[in-house]
Image (tube, rainbow, N blue to C red):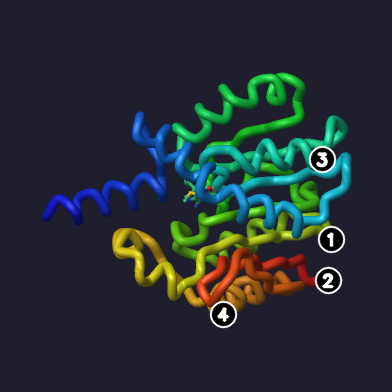
Amino acid sequence: MGLRESFERGLAKQLGHPTGRRGALTGMLLNHRNAQLIANAIDALELTPGSVAMDIGFGGGTGLGALLERVGPSGAVHGVDVSEAMLARARRRYAREIDAGRLALHQTSMSQLPVDDASVDGAITVNTIYFVDDLQRAFAEVAGVLVQGGRFVIGMADPDAMASMPVTRHGFTVRPTDDVIAALRAAHIDLVEHRRSGTGQRAQHLLVATPAA
Ligand SMILES: C[S@@+](CC[C@H](N)C(=O)[O-])C[C@H]1O[C@@H](n2cnc3c(N)ncnc32)[C@H](O)[C@@H]1O
């Protein structure tokens, strides 16, 4: 394996499951690169103060801070990620909010959410679905924890743009947006709106959805 391929493999592994010291660097990189898409995903949730929100695959943790701000002191946020490195980072960064009971962190996957059914008003997952094998199962799990009328917003890069990135050859599942929408439907979640974030044909996608009535 050449140096370049080895670098790409290493980066892909870190993006899908950050670990160790490189994981900490990955968290910083993610926060820097994805802040706008995360902010747009949170806007699309249309949360009100006092709401309960969730960020699934929170990575560097930018979304957690923005959600805490949005739900205010009477609201609560759940952070879900498979990576212990990302949880450790969030525990340090948001120690006060955790102590105050406003933020709960869970080391688990989108397919196994450890919160009560119908207890979450809005959930985002940004740049995470590429690492989920069974989307329908994961989306059904999200549907179960959302209140009726709650929102689920998926942020994802443009599939054509992703397919041209060498790093995505290593362990990413790049799906057309239509396949993601079909998985939502199969999980009994309706698409409310398909927005773009950024400009041009390769702008990122935001799928705004709600559990079917
Ligand atoms: C590319 S990062 C994106 C982080 C952040 N949402 C952002 O956009 O900057 C993907 C994150 O999802 C987490 N992840 C991967 N598979 C997951 C799963 N099945 N359930 C929850 N989190 C997952 C990874 O540990 C990583 O922190």
In three-dimensional space, the C-alpha distance between marks 4 and 3, rounded to whole angstroms, equals: 31 Å
**Residue 168 spot, x, y in % from top left:** 35, 62
Q: Amino acid at mark 4?
A: Asp
1 and 4 marks in contact (CB < 8 Å): no
Question: Label 1: which residue?
Answer: 148
In the figure, 89 relative to 113: above or below?
A: above
Name the front one of labels 1 and 4. Answer: 4
**Residue 22 spot, x, y in % from top left:** 35, 35
In three-dimensional space, the C-alpha distance between marks 1 and 4, rounded to whole angstroms, equals: 24 Å
Q: Specify the label residue 71 is tagged with.
A: 3
In the figure, 32 relative to 192: above or below?
A: above
Which image quarter is the N terminus in? bottom left
- Sequence order check: which comes first, mark 4 or mark 3? 3
2 and 1 marks in contact (CB < 8 Å): yes
Ligand 1 within 8 Å of the CB at mark 3: no
Q: Secondary structure at mark 1?
A: strand
In three-dimensional space, the C-alpha distance between marks 2 and 3, rounded to whole angstroms, equals: 25 Å
Question: Label 4: which residue?
Answer: 178
In the figure, 121 relative to 19: above or below?
A: below
- Sequence order check: which comes first, mark 2 or mark 3? 3
User: Residue drawn 69% across and 46% down?
Assistant: 54
Name the front one of labels 1 and 3. Answer: 3
Is 61 on the left-hand or right-hand side of 188?
A: left
